[in-house]
Amino acid sequence: MTNLSLQFEPLYPDVLNAITGLRIVVDTLHMAIGVHPVSVYLNQPVEIVVVLQNMIDQAMDVKIGLQLPTRDASGRPVHMMTPKKVIDVQMKPGEVGVARLPVVPLAPTMPGDHLPIRVAVRRRSRNGAPVRAPIGGAPASALMISPFKLQALQDVDYVEHSPDKSPEIVTVPFSLAPKRLPAVPPDLKPTYEPIWTAALMAQERANITAKLNEARVVADELSQSLIYPPILRAVDEVYAQRGLPLYPGEARAIAKCLAYTLDDSLAFDSTFRLEEARWYQTLCQVLAADESAVKLEAGALVSRYLFEAAMYDAVLVGFGLIRPRVRINLGDKTERANYANKLVNWLAGLVEPDLNYVYLPLVLGGVVVNHIVGGKNDDPWELIEQLRDAYRERMRVAHGEIITVFDMLDKLLARSEDELRRARVMPRR
């Protein structure tokens, strides 16, 4: 097989997800906050660990402050010491780093569970362009720390922070066991260590280039029959988690648009190159970072690593599918890309839910490819019936611009029925 050169500019890797699946978003700063160890004795330091990931191409100043409790849940006095309650971190563009702030519980603090430390994080930077996917980016293939340090970071007990709470103040609990160490260790101080910087992109590119041939082989194996069922499950789960629970027909149509994007989307536009697909770029990075990924089943590979990138691409593909079939201006390429970014930002929890993210253009695109995408026992007539049911339910409360989208849906469903009849595709029941 011939050697290939890198025909795209990779996004920076998502280092944070290699450490923990938990993520707190403060605009262009993504972070995870935890404690280690989770249980200590009097005079034994506990570390507040803050993993910081700069998402833009500008330097960022981050201020981390600790608010220590003075009383426990029973009202008894609590005494804690930290060498510095506030630290300032200067992050380079796209940098990922780890701040560690030691805290020592002292007498007369009584043993107990869930002693809370509040961590306040503020960021300041110039407006910058994103250098990472909002969520679901590929893992890093190069780091500035050893595998042992990475494992230690993965072992930290990170907190799950509810999206309805302020991301700038996070409560981190730990427990105090009924024992005392002889004395507080000397020379405690907070630290900050970069674990990934933009200087590593040269190595990332080299690692990606070495996997291009393998990535093409894997891409060829992402057939609809293999990826449609797991994509359908992922679509149903993700939309429900993000505040837009789907009717069955909606989930199936979106899954069809995604499966088409990952398999046959090149057929709709002869000018489109595989290297331009974000899901393919992400696949190349994944194979460079995780050698075991090539052994995953196609559905697991897509669900675990490629879903968000495929959603971005599916928006662009969906617009391309419906454009020749509707008489409404759907915007130029820049406007469509901006909309795709907004939808992915919603997946990342950065913007509010919008019913347009269900229908425009994903469900509409799924209707267009209804007759050519599906699982083993898929009935395209059933999808049409399910979407008409969803249409009736949605129209009961619909208002504003979504009415125009539903008008497009109605016309596309009628056209899909005609295509099925002409192709002599009969209902299976």
Image (spheres, rainbow, N blue to C red):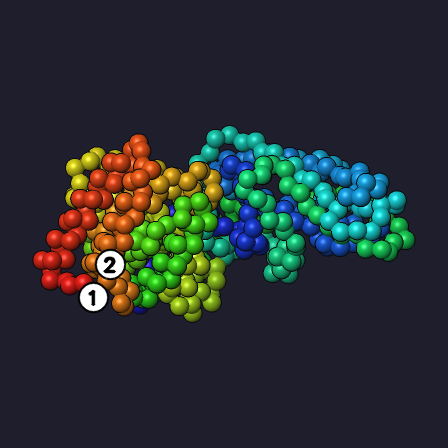
Secondary structure beneath disc 2? Answer: helix
Residue 319 percent across, percent down from the top left: 25, 44
Q: In which quadrant will I find the C terminus? A: bottom left
Mark carried by residue 382: 2
- The residue type indicated by label 1 comes to Arg
Mark 1, residue position? 428
Q: Nearer the viewer, residue 235 or 6?
A: 235
For badge 2, the amino acid type reads: Glu
Residue 380 screen position, x and y as percent: 22, 59
Q: Position of residue 10 (x, y in %)?
A: 41, 49
Mark 2 in CB contact with mark 1 (< 8 angstroms): yes
| On-image quarter of the N terminus | bottom left
Q: Is residue 411 left or right of residue 361?
A: left
Mark 1 surroundings within 10 Å by alpha-carbon count, few (fewer than 14), some (14 through 19), many (20 or more)? few
Residue 80 seen in render: no
- Please give the name of the residue rendered at 72% of the width and 54% of the height, measured from the top-left corner: 38
Using residue 353 as the reference point, say whether residue 321 is left or right of it.
left
